[in-house]
Structure formats: C-alpha cells, structure tokens
Amino acid sequence: MYFILVHTLCTPPSYIVGEVHSVEEYLNAVDEAFQRICSTPDRCELWYRGQKQLNQPLNPPESRWDLIPSITRPPFNPLMEVIFLSKFKSYAIPFVQELPSFPIPNGQAAYWHWLFMMQHYGVPTRILDWSRDALTGLFFALDGRGPSDAGKDAAVWILNPVRLNEAFSFHSFVKPGYIPNVDEEVVSLYFGPNAEILANKKPAAVIGPLNNPHIVAQKGVFTVFPHEREITPLNLFTDASNYLLEICVAEDKIPLILNQLKHYGITHFTLYPDITEVRNQINIEIREESQLPPASSN
C-alpha cells in the first residue's frame, strides 16, 4: 500500500513512505517500510525516531528534518564534548550518588555511561535517540508541540540498524546482524573520544546502557556519530535510502492521532515513569474524571 503525498513539508520523495492521517494509516506505512528496507521482513528489526520541524530557517529547507545530534547544532560542535562532559560530571556527581544504585561503572565503560546520562538529561551529545517501538516513535513526533509548531507537519524516521552498520562496515568487526553494546571495545575503537577518524563518516547503531527507567520504558536505542568537528546528517549519505525512510504526519490530524495513542496506552506518563510526572498525571485524571468543583457564579 502506497500513500499519496498532498501538502507534505517533509523530506524529498526518495525517503518518503507517505503522509498519514491516523494511527491506522501510520501502522500501514510502517508495514510498507518493512517491505522497502528489509530483505527478510519477518526477521527484520526497525527503529523509530519522532521529529518535529526545526523552527529556525535553514537552507536548503529540507535540512529542517536532518538527523543530526544536538551537539552539532550551532554554536556547538562535537569537539566540545569534553567540555560538556567535564562540567556535567562536576555538577551531577552529588545527585547521581543519591540514586538507589550508582550507575557508573569503572574503566572504559564509564565514559559511555556518563555520555548517555548526559543525553538523557538534555546536555548536548553526539548521540541520537531511537525507539524499538513504532508507536513510541510516533508519540515523540507529536508530543510537546507549541504555538511555533502551528502549520508544521511532523515526521517519524525509520531506520534499519543492521543495514546501517553494514554500510559502516561494522560487520568487519562484529557478526552480521549483531548490534553492539557501547561497552564493547569495537565501539570505543571507532567512536570513543580518542578514536582514529575513519574515511567512513557514518554513525553506527548501538545499544546503550539501560541506566534509566525512561530508556527502558521508551525501548530506547541509539545511533552514535563520529568524534570530529564536522558531522554529516544520517539522511544525507548517498546510500541512506537503503536503510532509512520517513513517514510524514499531517499537521491538521495531530490532535486526533494523539488522542488515538492515548487510547492505546501511549502517553507522556507511560513513557516517563518517574515520580516527577505524577503531579501532571494526577491533574490530567482529575480533569478527565470531572472531579473539579463547578466554577463559582460569584
């Protein structure tokens, strides 16, 4: 089943699965993606990343959808990672030590665990978040929209992580079909802070440390980009359509789709299982259950 593009503001058509107007259409588009970028769809894993348009004007306009990590956006660059990491450690250690289990291991793995903790708390890194769950990816494309997003479509990028790692030639070092954990030596060899910069500038698909309940709830997985000043967006590699597709979500249907996701149990509270979200969830339930007293006529 192919979908007809009408007024979409998404990426050029070579990447597009289609524009969707409901969760049903979205799931059909996901099935289409399996057919297009999986050699054997019944034994294929795809990852999902929800994305809104960037608010700043960019040239070319398509770059508002580019798949690049936060540390690459001006005025930052990936070589600033050591500065962010140093400052994060200084400020975060007192809070980390209060957690039920200190999540930072010793040795080489400590670097990656700190980096992924930075990513979780919004500090710029060269890591890009994905989810193994298609509906979670859709939710993150639509959640948190504000007035500046009016009139703008949303998108869900779909990645075949095994094909990406094959394109990177990661499988010269790990078995084909295997997605390495960041704690493994091969990841540090090519993506660590002291890695030798290769001619191949692609990121790699990796499994991160499950050191936060949010990552577990969101079925979080990641792509990690090279440690160098200039990074090429994942969608701009010449072979990207072999492992990457995009589903555009019509802006005028976003409230409907969010409501449908809620019916299926995909909400901010289920994806952020944290006591800091309890207040928001209580307020939502109080309103929806009509527990608020009637407004005074005075």
Image (cartoon, helix red, strand yellow):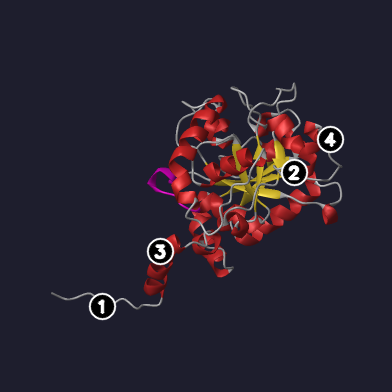
Which label sits in the foreground, 3 or 1? 3
Measured Cα–Cα span from mark 3 to mark 2:
35 Å
Q: Position of residue 179 (x, y in %)?
A: 77, 45
- Residue bearing the label numbered 2: 161
Q: Amino acid at mark 2?
A: Pro
Look at 51% across and 55% down and name the residue there: 254
Provide the residue designation for mark 1. Answer: 294
Compare marks 3 and 1 and give the one earlier in the sequence: 3
Return the residue at label 3.
280
* 68 displayed left or right of 237: left
Q: Secondary structure at mark 3?
A: helix
- Under tag 4, what secondary structure? loop
Q: Amino acid at mark 1?
A: Pro
Sequence-earlier tag: 3 or 4? 4
Disc 4 from disc 2: Cα separation: 16 Å
Callout in the foreground (1, 4): 4
Q: Nearer the viewer, mark 1 or mark 2?
A: 2
**Residue type, label 3:** Asn
Residues under labels 1 and 4: Cα distance?
A: 66 Å
First of labels 1, 4 by sequence position: 4
Region in magenta: 143-151
Mark 3 vs mark 4: give the one in front.
4
Query: In the rendered structure, are the residues bearing label 3 and label 2 in contact, judged by CB atoms less than 8 Å apart?
Result: no
First in sequence: mark 3 vs mark 2? 2
Q: CA distance from mark 3 to mark 1?
A: 21 Å
